[in-house]
Amino acid sequence: MPALPGLDRIMMNCESLSLETLTRLYLIKHHLFKKARKTDLVTVVSDVCGLHAQAVTTPYLSLWNRVEDLEDALLDEALYKAKSLVKTWVMRGTLHVIPSADLPIYSKALRRMWFEHHGRFMRAPDWPLKEERRNVIYPKILEALAQKPLKRKDLNGKVRSLLKVDSQPYKKLFSSWGGILKETAYEGLTVCAQPAERESCFARLDKWLPHTDLNKVSEEEAHEKLLVKYLRGYGPATQQDFCLWSGLTASDAKEAIENAGSIIEEVRVEGAKGVFLLLKQDFRLLGSIDVDEKAPPCLLPRYDSFLLGHKDRTRIISDEHRQRVFKSKAGDIAATLLVNGRIVGTWRYKKTERMLTIMITPFEKIAKEDLKEIEHKAKDLSQYMGTEDCKLSIVS
């Protein structure tokens, strides 16, 4: 098969990748350039390395931007009936929806980081000691969940009844921020189950996914596999990007890169410092990109994964507007309007039975032709949300 135009030059590293090429590559990898078929829903979740799920609507809207003819029931079916997807805490101590088949990779790769770094806030006197949590409280949680999944508040009551304690260190155990259920998730004991009456529920992993073996990979293997998965969705990327996204230490990331060295190539990016890592299999995809082909607009939800994969975000948003999207150190990230791969504004919506009103706050004037495409996108969202009509308004 003949080489694609420009492919040989890229592979020989005689030229740097342009930012335009890079942006389109990320859009393609994230299924934001062309939507996937709904039969490929699980594949899409795998390709983007999970759907951020801290906000209830985010995974649904993230998939709506990426999958044709999406219905909420498709995600619910995959999560709670087929169980080909699972919701649990993974990268950076945040809830994600990931493929159930990939749970051993995420669990083994990220477990130690939680206990050594991210979860260090669980200390006395506000929390029971780690040994007590592991030897006394974990078994009670598993006992409480032996018959069926439970709502957080019901699980809290049952466990505290079994423990027969009501002291201060036990009051935060079932915090809505995760608490000990985040810890048991990293231990591979619990996962999120189907909500009941719009409230979070939790299940034992061995009951929910009985054939899942979290020890099928070693930690070292899991780090390498996680890196490869990351580069499939976010490469080219730097080691620092991978650390920021995953929460792994620099030494763990460096070892993973060395272990995966045979399938990775180093590339340069115009205007960017440092060495970027790209899977060798992606070179052919790079060579096929037409930078003049315009990408469709996207109405990305809060915390969409497209925004969270890289440390340097100037590729997708101007520095002067960055704080309007990435609002605080606590990690609040706005819903964003993407035009041709760049963030040009934020958006929010109000929904009634008959009307979906989408309010866009642009950072700059939007061209008429782009505005027409955004209007079509808004109508598609209205149809997805089941409203009869749609109104698009521009607000300051």
Image: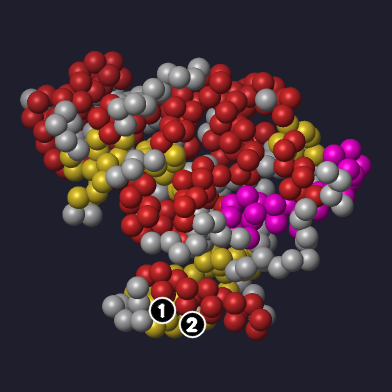
Residue 376 in picture, x, y percent from top left? 54, 78
Dot 2 surroundings within 10 Å: few (below 14), some, or many (20 or more)? few
Residue 203 in picture, x, y percent from top left? 24, 35
Residue 144 in picture, x, y percent from top left? 15, 29
Q: Residue 344 is drawn in which quadrant? A: bottom right
Q: What is the spatial separation of the Cα atoms under label 2 and label 1, in whole angstroms?
A: 7 Å
Residue under pointer 1: 357
The residue under the point 37% across, 55% down is: 74
Magenta residue check for 332: no
The residue under the point 60% across, 25% down is: 224
Quarter of the picture holding the N terminus: top right
Residue under pointer 2: 393
**Could you tell me which secondary element the residue under label 2 belongs to?**
strand
Can residue 137 be seen from the camera position used here?
Answer: no
Q: Report if the CB atoms under discs 2 and 1 are less than 8 Å apart.
A: yes
Residue lying at the far front in this picture: please name it. 1
The residue under the point 64% across, 56% down is: 27
The residue under the point 20% across, 26% down is: 142
Amino acid type at image mark 1: Thr
**Could you tell me which secondary element the residue under label 1 belongs to?**
strand
| Magenta range | 6-33
Residue 119 in picture, x, y percent from top left? 40, 30
Q: Colour scheme of this structure image? A: secondary structure
336 or 177: which is nearer to us? Answer: 336
On screen, residue 156 above or below 356 = above
Mark 2 or 1, nearer chain start: 1
43 or 230: which is nearer to us? Answer: 43
